[in-house]
Amino acid sequence: MKNFEYLQPKSIAEAAGYLKAGNGTSIPYSGGTDALVMMKDNLISPKKVVNLKSIPGLNSIDYIRGEGLKIGALVTISDLAEHPVVKDKFKILSEAAESIASPQLRNVGTVGGNLCQRPRCAYFREDFDCLRKGGNACYAFDGENKLHCIIGGSLCYIVHPSDLATALLVLNTKISIASGEKINEIPIADFFVLPDEDFTRENILQSGEIVTSIFIPDLPEGTKSSYIKFRERAVWDFAVVSVGAVIQTSGSEIVSGRIAFGGVAPIPWTESVVNSKLINRTIDAHIADEIAESILSNADSLEMNGYKIPLAKNLTKRILTQLLM
Amino acid sequence: MSEETKSNKFSRRKFVKGIGSSIAGGYILSPAIAKAAKKISKEAKDFSEGKVPLSLKVNESVINVMIEPRTTLAELLRDELKLTGTKVVCNHGECGGCTVLLNNKAVYSCHLLALDAAGKDVTTIEGLSSNGKLHKIQQAFVDEDGLQCGFCTPGQVMAAAALLYKYSKPDKQQIMKEMSGNLCRCAAYPNIIKSVLSAVEKSNG
Ligand code: FES
Ligand code: FES
């Protein structure tokens, strides 16, 4: 790892200034759990590392009943997972947070960093001059693509590695981004970028822009939620496929529901045709099968990852059965 | 472990460290190497311009050092402070061998910039025992044979120590979850869990 200057801004504006002035040679740094890997492996060698942790006010969780949950970008994954309101009301989020990496990394990694982490594709991480790193080929397309995407890929076939992203997409989260003097709040669905838009980035952040917080609207009474992550090892592993669901019921009726998937696409993935089937629907014995059959209808798997389609369907059945039966 | 074997072990470790430095000292006598050494020390001096001050507490002592920002906490502990009980195995935040406590929470010291520990309290395996008396987790690992080769053990013990800060009476499930960030290549897991359970039982009377 090359040496660098470690800058300690006291405000978002100061941090943004450092990042802009760096002209691509400065990086934002919070927990560093991913950035440090990239630096140790010389995938990036920034001249200046801008420590966002020195900025006050970005590490609290505030809940207002009836409004929602505001989570600062610097909240650690373990503080999120263990927060009483998150555990009680937003189970999908505490379950997703708990499933991330290991206790040691959850104590250090942050919410903002988790959303901005780079892909885990082995070709991206290792010594391949791949498209996402400015090269001219995606080696996964006809290479080892067991863990790559089955939908939403074109030119590049990564999956988005963030568990929180999938959960937050289900929760209709808004994400706040400091850009110049302004803070823009956008739906989290608009934050992530598919490869056919730009295969060199996973999100819309421009140099000098910083994620400051996220906001999750409160869930109505009678809402249940969950996150199921299928992985090859029980701990410290990324999702092979994951599914998150939030469902509001009233008696034997589903009022509304949303499902999203991780590990299937270059962005956290949700489908409005599927979610629309979860509005004003009577709960019956077929519902889990029916919804599971309807997901990922446009999936187009690569040579080694076709198994992800039945896996996603089965996880969908499992999560619906768990939440409804 | 008897006092005698313990002190033997410590002196063996000092001996190994000592050999390293005396060999280096011997070589300096050769003029070619002396020249090379001069060059290295000049480079080292240039490097030192990139150094910044860091102040933190390690095992309750205040430490003030000048370090390069890229220094990891594990490098600071092992290379600068000679606290070599902390092991670096993967150096990638994946195995847990380097686990230490930062403000009583478990972290991978190989995967944390030393500068991120500024103003905080670091506890290493060396700081766990007090007045020559092993910490209850250490004692339990000895009593329950919670290791085979022992290389992962300092990290396991620190992860278990963090667990006891988090839960006063963790159950087996909680132990397995909180220690899941620590790999053991010898797969001594059953006895590691047994050791932690026994320490928990003992401390709860
Ligand atoms: S050496 Fe730090 S986690 Fe492996
Ligand atoms: S005892 Fe050998 S690696 Fe754990």
Image (cartoon, coloured by chain):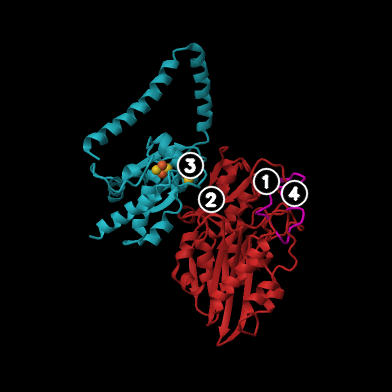
Magenta stretch: residue B65 in it? no
- Name the residue beneath numbered marker 2: A33
Which chain letter goes with mark 4?
A: A
As measured in the structure, the alpha-carbon distance from the residue carrying label 3 to the one carrying label 2 is 12 Å
- Name the amino acid, label 2: Thr
Magenta-colored segment: predominant secondary structure = loop
Q: Chain of mark 1?
A: A
Q: Is label 1 in a helix, a strand or a loop?
A: helix
Mark sitting on residue B72:
3
Amino acid under disc 3: Thr
Determine the residue positioned at 72% across, 42% down: A129
Residue under label 4: A142
* Mark earlier in primary sequence (2, 4): 2
**Would residue B144 be found to the left or right of residue A302 on screen?**
left
Q: CA distance from mark 3 to mark 4?
A: 38 Å
Q: Which residues are magenta?
A: A133-156
Q: Relative to B103, does residue A40 appear above or below in the rendering? A: above
Q: Amino acid at mark 1?
A: Tyr
Q: Amino acid at mark 4?
A: Asp
